Image: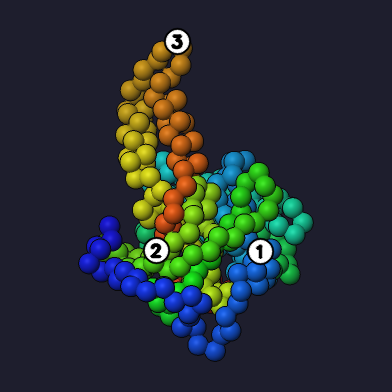
Amino acid sequence: MVHMSKVVLAVSIVAGTSLSFGAKSMTTKEIFSKNRNAVVQIYVNNQFSGTGFFVSSDGIVATANHVVSLRENQFKKFADNIKVVVPLTGSILDAVPLTAITDESVAHDTALLKINGSNFTFVQLGKLSDEEEGNTAAVICAIAGLGKQAIFTGIVSAKATSDGPNPVDVVLFQTPVRGGFSGSPLFNSTGQVIGIVSTKVFGISPALDTMRAQFQTAAASGGSVRMFGVDVGQSLIELTNVLDQNLISGMGTAVSSSYAAAMLKATAKAKK
């Protein structure tokens, strides 16, 4: 849990401000035009699970760990069937995890995938530490069913570091988010990715998440109630999932992109 005493709230809004020295500010249109083809849809077991984005031209994709891992295993096991939809071609390609899941990667809610191919459009990673509250921010997400990307803009609202054995640097930002946005890149005003959207950090609806966990625990322990031949518990879980997926919040959370950068660096070093 993030202690609000560690969160420095924004006291002013400075449109277009950025501390990425030497980088030129970009318009929202420029950020979208440059990066839209780097943002992919991710499917797990043939169902849309979330968003990801290329961090290299040779097919390395960054996303949130919970997008590609299994809730029933506390997000410590990758799903068996992960696919990525490439924007430019519409190709649906198999993706394999590039790094193993660790307690740290679960806490940081970050994962890297690899697909076969080359010359993919990819993003530039920036530093969350360079950003200030009030700076502009933008999320590019992949929306299932539309077959295209969308961009939403707002501001950096707060930055914080969680407590615990694996502290996590997070950023709160003001822009609409909903289920499926997890794994999306959060851009600063110079078009660099400073965070990976993670609805798992606070959840769009903590109450629904708690209810779902209670139903799942009851189902796992053998509890079952049927009415007219319908499993009431399972139906409530499915209803909760639908409600949670379609809720929209005006405040989003992202983990620092530095975790993906570190994983990418470690992977490159291991290849040498």
The numbered disc on residue 36 is 1
Determine which quarter of the picture holds residue 173: bottom left
Label 1 vs 3, first from the N-terminus: 1
Q: Which residue is mark 3?
A: 228
Residue type for callout 1: Arg
Give residue 7's quadrant in the image.
Answer: bottom left
Tell me the distance, in whole angstroms, between the alpha carbons under discs 2 and 1.
Answer: 22 Å
Q: Is residue 254 left or right of residue 271?
A: left
CA distance separating discs 1 and 3: 48 Å
- Name the kind of residue labelled 3 in the image: Phe
Mark 2 or mark 3: name the one nearer the start of the chain: 2
Count of marks placed on residues: 3
Q: Residues within 10 Å of mark 3 (few under 14, many from 20)?
A: few
Residue closer to the observer: 152 or 71: 152
Residue 261 x, y percent position in the rendering: 50, 73
Image point (61%, 54%), residue name:
142
Q: Is residue 160 left or right of residue 228?
A: left
Is residue 133 shown above or below 153? below
Q: Which residue occupies 39% across, 63% down? A: 172
Quarter of the image containing the N terminus? bottom left
The answer to whether residue 56 is seen in the rendering is no
The secondary element bearing badge 1 is classed as helix
* Position of residue 37 measured from the top left corner of the image (x, y, whole percent): 69, 63
Instruction: Name the residue nearer the viewer: 17 or 104.
Output: 17
Amino acid identity at mark 2: Leu
Residue identifier under label 2: 172
Residue at 46 percent of width and 12 percent of height: 229
Dot 2: element:
strand
Q: Position of residue 147 (x, y in %)?
A: 69, 49
Quadrant of the snapshot with the C terminus: bottom right
